[in-house]
Image (tube, rainbow, N blue to C red):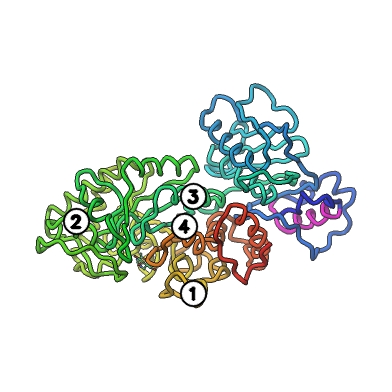
Amino acid sequence: MFANPSSQKYSALAALFAATFILTSCRTPPEALMSAHTRETATPIRKTAITPTIAVIPRPASVAFTGETFTLTADTQIFVEPDSPELLAVGQYLAERLRPATAYPLPMQAATGAPPPGSIYLTTSGSDPTLGEEGYELTVTPQAVILSAPYPAGLFWGIQTLRQLLPPAVESLTPQAGPWTLPAGTIRDWPRFPWRGMMLDVSRHFFGPAEVRRLIDLLALYKINRLHLHLSDDQGWRIEIRSWPNLAFHGGSTQVGGGPGGYYTQEEYADLIAYARSRYIIIVPEIDMPGHTNAALASYPELNCDGVAPPLYTGTEVGFSSLCLEKEVTYRFVDDVVSEIAALTPGPYFHIGGDEAMATPLPQYIAFVERVQHIVQSHGKQMIGWEEIAQASLLSTSIAQVWHGGMGREAVRQGNRVIMSPAFKAYLDMKYTPDTPLGLHWAGYIEVRDAYEWDPATVAEGIGEEHILGVEAPLWTETIQTMADIEWMTFPRLMGYAEIGWSPASGRDWEEYRSRLGRHGSRLEALGVNFYRSPQVPWE
Ligand code: IFG
């Protein structure tokens, strides 16, 4: 948490408050953190009622604050460690985020020597390897901003923190008044879980590439690093499969409510993968099977046990469809689909769904999951499935996604790891309150506080921290039709899930979080996000 550096009244008093904050909330011995300045003015530390107001979400693991500031100017330059195309791309990303609102040129280049005073410097050399694959260290002094990380991903996440240390207006796409000051100090930060995800159901209602790219940009600001795309269901097949073209042409031609639907061509899908990759987000494709398959069954009569293709479905019932598991053509279909999508997906994961297969006899379901598991593996991917897959014998690499029904424990008993998406805490299609016009409420109402006040390591009996890859918040879109709808159901709850996935479990407290979250109101506004202004949050 940082005092608002853009306020000219920033004073020794604020430094003292900061020292108080340091004494109560970071891991580094306090005496090592206080600057000489603070030491001189330090009086016996009292808990202060006034807390500085700049806030970072997810809260960093360790912060130290000196009470000074760094100010961006028209002369500020961005340098990156030389000889790294990937770091140039990360440097370019930073420059592009800061140029519109500051209207500063902010030239970005590889450093040929020590960057001049007043520079921002991104580097992986000389970084602390204990920060891990996504960790970073941000050091700000009045003379320089140095962001160092063992890997480029850490620099990318450090940039998100840097953005959030600047006034919210920095997110604007048009020039804004400064000053653009950063609080000086050191942040050492790394994630608690490697999997911090959101799922978008593009089957019930289809969302085009531009909408998915906007979502990717918003996820990156909060260090979400997985986007799971639910690409097929009863109501729509959303990705071109060249060996089975009717899946997209026919199966993708409608959606809930009977609208035009749509689908991603393989080129569009590949472009989304690349765009997400440039934001250090891994796309996880899901083809839901053997249930939730009416769109596929409607597209090819041979996939149906009776050889008759059902009509396209535009309602919102679940559990009525199943691939015909006793036909060999079904497994050729699965292999062809997995093969084409896997070839387009550099990420290591393929999600086979597996949920709500009420129309599939259990013994056949189990045999299907075990066979498809090998098909996925044969195409070089790790299988993920909703928790029902734990009824089958899982390969050690397979991952179960916990949502509802208590089968996650069975996956853990098999020694497999889980992704936590408990519907009653993490389903973004749940209404905030009974008055929420969008969404469902079968798993309960999830206000912003409910979305924050839980922990994946304790939420489910028999599933502990060591079994958990991380958290993911699914947005099912039976009732979600536009980008504004997506944003309203997703923000601000996703920010809480981002903090649950990234920040240390110890010290997470709703009263402290809600004031930080309140500071993001103007940031979300500057980003044009149509977020829900929960009455539980002191929005600023
Ligand atoms: N459950 C279904 C989804 C969707 C959801 C709506 C899972 C894994 C209810 N399956 O959640 O398809 O209909 O909240």
Disc 3, SS: helix
Mark 1 and mark 2 lie on one chain; the one further toward the N terminus is 2
Instruction: From the viewer's side, name the closer residue of 393 and 222.
Output: 222
Mark 3 and mark 2 lie on one chain; the one further toward the N terminus is 3
Q: Which residue is mark 3?
A: 214
Q: Which residue is mark 4?
A: 483
Q: Position of residue 476 (x, y in %)?
A: 40, 63
Q: Residue furthest top?
A: 112
Instruction: From the viewer's side, name the closer residue of 431 and 194.
Output: 431
**Amino acid at the residue labelled 4:** Met
Hey, which quadrant is residue 260 in on the image?
bottom left
Reply yes or no: does residue 14 show up in magenta: yes
Q: Residue furthest left?
A: 306
> In the shown orientation, is residue 116 left or right of residue 520?
right
**Amino acid at the residue labelled 2:** Ser
Q: Which residues are magenta?
A: 13-27
Do the CB atoms of the residues marked 3 and 2 lie less than 8 Å apart? no
